[in-house]
Image (cartoon, rainbow, N blue to C red):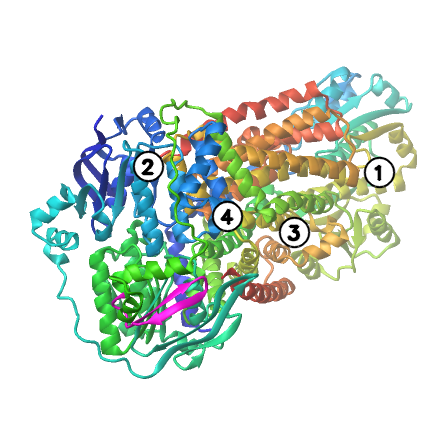
Amino acid sequence: MNTAAELVNVSHFYGDKCALKSITLSVPAASTTAIIGPDGVGKSTLLGLIAGAKVLQQGSISTLGEDLSLGPGRHRLFQRVAYMPQGLGKNLYPALSVYENVAFFAGLFALPKSERVERIEQLLAATGLLDFAERRAGQLSGGMKQKLGLCCALIHDPDLLLLDEPTTGIDPLSRRQFWRLIERLQQLQPQLSVVVATASMSEAARFEQLVVMHNGEILAHCKPFELLDKTGAESLEQAFLQLLPNTYQLPAVATASRAQPVDEIAIEARSLTKKFGAFTAVDTIDLTVKRGEIFGFLGSNGCGKTTTMKMLTGLLPATSGSGTLLGEPIAASSRASRYKVGYMTQQFSLFNELTVEQNLRLHAQLFKVASHQVAARVKWAAEQFNLNEQLHELPPQLPLGERQRLSLAVAMIHRPEVLILDEPTSGVDPVARELFWQLLIDLAQQQQVTIFISTHYMEEATRCDRISLMHAGKIIVTDTPTAIMAKENAASLDDAFVQLLQRAQTDNVAPVATELLPSESSQRRSPYFSWRRCWSYLRRESMELLRDPIRLWMAALGSVILMTVLGYGMNMDVEDLSFAVLDYDQSQLSHDYTHSIAASRYFAEQSPLINEADMEQRLRSGEISLALELPYGFARDVESGRRVEIGAWIDGSLPMRAETVQGYVQGLHLHWLQQRYTPEQDALTAAARIDTRYRYNPEVKSLPAMMPAVIPLLLLMFPAILTSLAVVREKELGSILNFYVTPTTRLEFLLGKLVPYVVLGMVNYAVLLLLAVYLFEVPLTGSLAALTLASLFYVINAALFGLIISAFVRSQIAALFATTLATIVPAAQFSGLLTPVPSLEGAARWIGEVFPATYHIVVTRGVFSKGMSFTDALPAIAPLVIAIPILLTTAALLLRKQER
Amino acid sequence: MRLRTVAILGWKELQTIVRDPILLLIVVVAFSVSVYTAASAMPDTLHKTPIAVIDDDQSQLSQRIVQAFREPYFLPPESVSYQLADQLMDQGRYTFIVHIPSHFQRDFLAGNATSIQVLVDATRMTQAFTGSGYLQVMIQQELQAVMGTTALPPIELNLRSRFNPELNAGWFSAVNEVISQITMLSIILTGAALLREREHGTIEHLLVMPISAMEIMAAKVWSMALVVMIAALASLVLVVQTALEIPLAGSLSVFTLALVLHLFATTSLGIFLASFARSMPQFGLLLMLVILPMEILSGGMTPRESLPPVVYYLMSAAPTTHFIEASQAILFRGAGLSLVTPQIIALAIIGTLFFAIAHARFRRALTYWQ
């Protein structure tokens, strides 16, 4: 095998948009290859396809000799390939520590424990992360995140390493360290192939092979020097530009001498400080930016640049110190000043659900651009930032560079006087960056716009009027680029900064070149089910759950609160129903009749009705549920034996209550008649007594009847809600990729997601049980073992139910709604909680028959109230067991192992 | 607060919802299939109640009694043996088992003491209480018919149900389902939309613009309320009135007024909950804590009169309580605006209060979300 990847006629489409046009490419093994090209030419798609993360639509790919159109081929491949996606730490887990992150990946490749510990330590030492092993990934700087990403990618000693723009958004020092690390790796493991997608030409020169891409096609595939020979260019950058179609040719670089900035202060900071708890993010910094100046802000990741910028925009209140923006104090940053400032955050933060055009329009409107100018302004922005072709696309479909351009366009749509830009060009290709800088220079020169910009690109820094270098919350130096270079006696600004940073840095340990033992894992066969991989997912999910104490407590205490409220509140007894009488007779007999009704505990008499209209009105308003009408001559007619009719109007709007009222009234009527007129017959019918025995709940209290019914409801909802977010959450946040590109199978993934919540559900069950028995004193009369076993299967059912929803929906909102919809309604209404399932009709009956809650209610009621034995419970437990494989299969079928 | 900003931001929310087809599908299902199923499923409380008899007498009288248990109230009574009765009831097969002892007819006619036993499965609360009353009346009527009731004066009780003459439980279930979907959807949509913005960092982005917390909130409230309102009204007209042929007594415009006020409160509640949660799973749990009691204890599932006093007063702080009361009055009993004024005022007060609290809470949350 001498190719790392072999692609034949591969095409890829996103909807109608063609991302790759019939690509044929052969990447040699044991080499380094860079895929270069501007944003949106299909670099990421290509890498995703080679890694097997994306579904292959057309053509054929064989990576490391494995055919990717076949599932088994992909499964074998994942054991030998590593893929690091675009975006800082996108596939890492912020709640886990550095060590735990690497350990999680080690588990996914089923590394045995002995080998694992050693290898993790080696990797961490090699990347200089060993001292930070306990730090949470979410608290790492960008550079450290990328190093951690690399550790995770290398854990299984892959034969092919795919890196998608690994150094985007990383400071120069970290960047140097990163590439040195890759070089070192290759020295240690010569058989390793590395494929990198990058937009940076200076980085591309390091690679043995170059693949130049444009517009979904490959323009050239050769060695770097061949490219130079072929084009006759002096630098790769120029060679690259020459290969591109004409539209991408750069206009002459604007190097015209800059007019001196006006002597007017636009931004000023005095002893500005920001503390987060004990940590000082920004430490008493002073800076002054003049109107029309381009001020560069440099420094390693996490040194406080972003915090400073947020304070200057008024987003974050300063702990101490002060600042002014356009002459106004920042603390009281008025709304008026916001119209004059454009701010672009580091992370893309536009609306993913709106198209490019809608985003531009929205921002123009929000910044109060006059409505007749909005269209023109949107057009201007689209042209200026080269977004015309993307106007109707959604941001998530765009490559990083194009998204950055959109962010910029949005920040400038209202033509602000001050622009505060936080790493605006990270991930933007050189051509687009050049265009962007020309625009910035133009704005500063022509329109006296003040620009405060942070960047990691030194060639950009040289174009600033002045720059500041920040480190660990402090500004180390502020001067013009040339002055800094002169002072440091460095050939380039890049060198000057690395020198300055190295002097200042104490914590960022340079990578130690340790030896990396080859792992045996790549030789090991990868079974279709591995407990280690499953355990790794399970452990991670549990740790995330345990690190979220709020979620944990809510899941535990929430059910207790709900049980208390519902247990006490759900009451089916109907008593003290309000009724009123329209008594036309006003005789002793009619009063006696009224009294007999009012005396019962079921009814409470309200003030008498005056007339029919009054009756209508009070029934309508819901004030009374029953109206009795005793006709004129009631007593007289009864006396003379004539037929008399008493009218009873019942409010039928609540049918259940109305039926109860009907029953009560009929009973009371009969009782009154018998008592008054046939004492002797009464004796006779009394001889034939009707004994009503309420089984299971002799005192007819609601609590013992309701409590066992509430438990199934709660045991269903909590696990289901939690698992329903488990998968879709990873989809939304991007870490689902780890499932796509590792040998993890669907079953392992699902079980890993399932078990922690089942355990939580069972803890919940124990708490509810104790609560019911000891606090509410509902006696447990049947087999505890049966109840526990049924509950276990039931909770598994509930959690699987959530997973099915999670695998199906796209957003967390949809998952939440679908779960509440699919659990509360059937469980509360169709499962025999109030109405027995056999009495239901239509679809509800059918739902009730198959819904797990139905069977769990039978068992809880049986065990609590009916003294159900273990064997009695088996017929109800069996369906719960049978449902598990069915639900698990459904979830597995709905879950995709590849990205579309 | 500027109305134009609120309008623009709200429009953005609407565009966002349209981009999630599965969410839209779920909304449609919730307001159509779900409502239809609930309406056509729920029988009257005493409808086809499973009943069994142990007829040890096998006399004319005992058969007469057994035959009195008829549909639609009861399923045809099944004959079971005394030995099996307990077990069958344990399995939940029957709600009632009527035991007529041997020599019942002889003893009864002779005036000797005898008794019919009615076993009731009290765990089936709704059927147990209504049903045992019915059973007693039915048996007694049969006994009296045998004895001849000439001694009793002919006083008849003429029972009539107002507003729902046949006591069709489907009427109630359908409307109740619509109401519960309104509450659920409005809280989830608003809260989750806010949390999603937070998780994607777009809230911060909004705050650097000349936009206030109040405007962000107001935009979410109006847009989400509008979506739910359209879905709910469509459901009432198309599903409840047209497909299920349930007559709605009152005016839809009065109902819409109550609905708008209710949505004002629930969407504010959604924002309030979202401002507490740090992630979507936390929000999901909070949601359960709030939605379940609101669905079950505000008169939609169980009669409100029978709540214990503490819960009763607690639940009067929930907008659903008043909204359900108002909707029942308007839609079933045809009450006009004047009759539901107390509920409308209560909803307006609760809504304003919720909005104010949510706004205070949201503004505080924004500072530490940074």
Residue furthest front as drawn: A489
**Where residue B35 sits in the image (x, y, percent)?**
51, 44
Find the distance from the CA under tag 2 to the CA under tag 1: 86 Å
Q: Residue at x 42, y 65 (%)?
A: B206
Tell me whether the residue at label 4 lies in contact with that at label 2, contact meaning CB atoms closer than 8 angstroms. no
Mark 2 residue crowding within 10 angstroms, few (<14) / some (14–19) / many (20+): many
* Left or right of A567 on screen, residue B341: left
Find the distance from the CA under tag 3 to the CA under tag 4: 45 Å
Q: Is residue A295 visible?
A: yes
| Residue mark closest to the camera, 2 vs 1 | 2
Write down the chain letter for disc 1: B
Name the main secondary structure of what is drawn in magenta: strand
Rendered image: mark on residue B298: 3
Find the distance from the CA under tag 4 to the CA under tag 1: 86 Å
* Left or right of A354 on screen, residue A791: right
Residue A358: quarter of image: bottom left
Label 2 is placed on what type of residue?
Ala
In this view, the residue in front, A617 or B28, is B28
Label 1 is placed on what type of residue?
Leu
Rendered image: mark on residue A307: none
Rendered image: mark on residue A136: 4
Q: Secondary structure at mark 4?
A: loop
Same chain for mark 3 and mark 4? The answer is no
Q: Secondary structure at mark 1?
A: loop
Rendered image: mark on residue B152: 1
Who comes first in sequence, dot 3 or dot 1? 1
Magenta span of residues: A462-480
Looking at the image, how many numbered discs can be counted on the residues?
4
Write down the chain letter for disc 4: A
Label 2, on which residue? A53
